[in-house]
Amino acid sequence: KSISLSLIITFLFIQCYLHHTSIIEKPEGYDDKEVNLKEPIPLKVRFGETKYKDFVLIGYRPHANSGCAQWKKDLVRIDNECFRKIEVREKGNYFSNELISKLKSSNSLQFNSNSNLKIEINAFSDKEGDLRSESLWIILGTIIAIPIVVAYFNAIFPKGDVRNFFNGSVVLGAILINIIPPSDNNYAKYEIDLYDSKSNVKIKTFTYKTEHTKSRGFFNALYGVFFPMFSDSFDQSLNENTYTIARVVSNQFEKDFIQEMERNPELRKLAYINEPPTHIIQLNSKPGKENNSFNQFFITKLESKLQDKGLVFLSNKINTNSDRIITLEDAYFNEETNDFSYFLQCKDSKTKQIIWKEKGIRSIIKKDFDKDIDKIIDEIIFSLEEKAEL
């Protein structure tokens, strides 16, 4: 009997997350009609600087007319301080690579680093609205449930039967909490800036405000099977991570962007694909940090992988007619610690403007030398793809 009761309690406390995201504010002048372009629009896409800065969760702004506004504000402030780690997980939701993946899968858009149109995606916490604290909701729900539980089990069990009373209370409490699962809302604002890549002039900003609701409870395991089948705005997970925010924002932006392209022929012409720039890759090490054989091996592999990604390289490494020069500077492999440090930068040959730069320190295991070098280069390429340089 005790085992059965334990299984029931465990079953009821299995927690699943159900996520829902909606656009609560979007740019004016666009509708939901489908637009079919004859040719896909070439585009460069990247996350903006906000991805690399602290993303602070929405604050709590109580309604001014609420008599207990300050009390609620203090409780939620304390709760947020206790659960500060949530911020790290939430940041991943708002800068999920699913957003770029969804745009890449579009039939109307074509990712191309040589396009003259670039979009930059930035997300910010939005302090409008209320944040319902999850733990506060559980506390209030428990307080409400106590008199119901006491009244019910006083009628069912004889006085003094403490064990049955306790077991029953736990089961009923678990059921009550899962029927009305605790939830909280996060609000964010996306600004997707459209640039002329050549002049780096901002052409237009698409602004979206999102509301993300996540609830946790056993019955979400049932809801989560069906809801995502009908809409990208729903998602089910075992933790706070979700793709719904990225999917909803990318879907809405794609519709609005394509409509903008349809009604603005001049903007569509601006999205021409330039001739790809030519590159050479060079080694420039400081005295005492040569490691020439190692560094040459590294840049040879790097060049090969960059070529696979579409970069054009000249065979003559000292050719001054290349459009861009990639330089491996301050590269050093410390054989005592097995650490490899590097600094890569790409410059325009004529203007000397820095196009991109990458640096890092990574450990290399000698027996896995080739694999570790491949991992380092893959990380560099992934970073360049995020910056729309590949």
Image (spheres, rainbow, N blue to C red):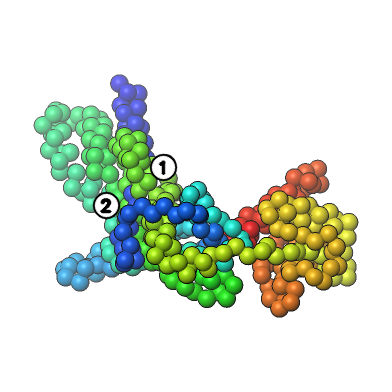
Q: Secondary structure at mark 1?
A: strand
The x and y percentages for residue 4 are 32, 23
Q: At label 2, which amino acid type do we have?
A: Trp
Q: Is residue 42 visible?
A: yes
Please tell me which residue lies in front, 214 or 173: 214
Residue 237 — which label?
Answer: 1
Most extreme residue toward the left is: 155
The quadrant of the rendering that contains the N terminus is top left
Q: Which residue is mark 2?
A: 137
> In the figure, is residue 316 to the left or right of 118?
right
Residue name at image x 50 percent, y 54 percent = 39
- Of the two numbered discs 2 and 1 on the same chain, state the one appearing first in sequence: 2
How many neighbours does mark 2 have within 10 angstroms: few (below 14), some (14-19), or many (20 or more)? Answer: some
Q: Is residue 220 visible?
A: no
Residue name at image x 27 percent, y 40 percent = 178
Residue name at image x 47 percent, y 73 percent = 203
Q: Secondary structure at mark 2?
A: helix
Displayed quadrant of residue 227: top left
| Number of numbered discs overlaid on the protein picture | 2
Residue name at image x 41 percent, y 61 percent = 262
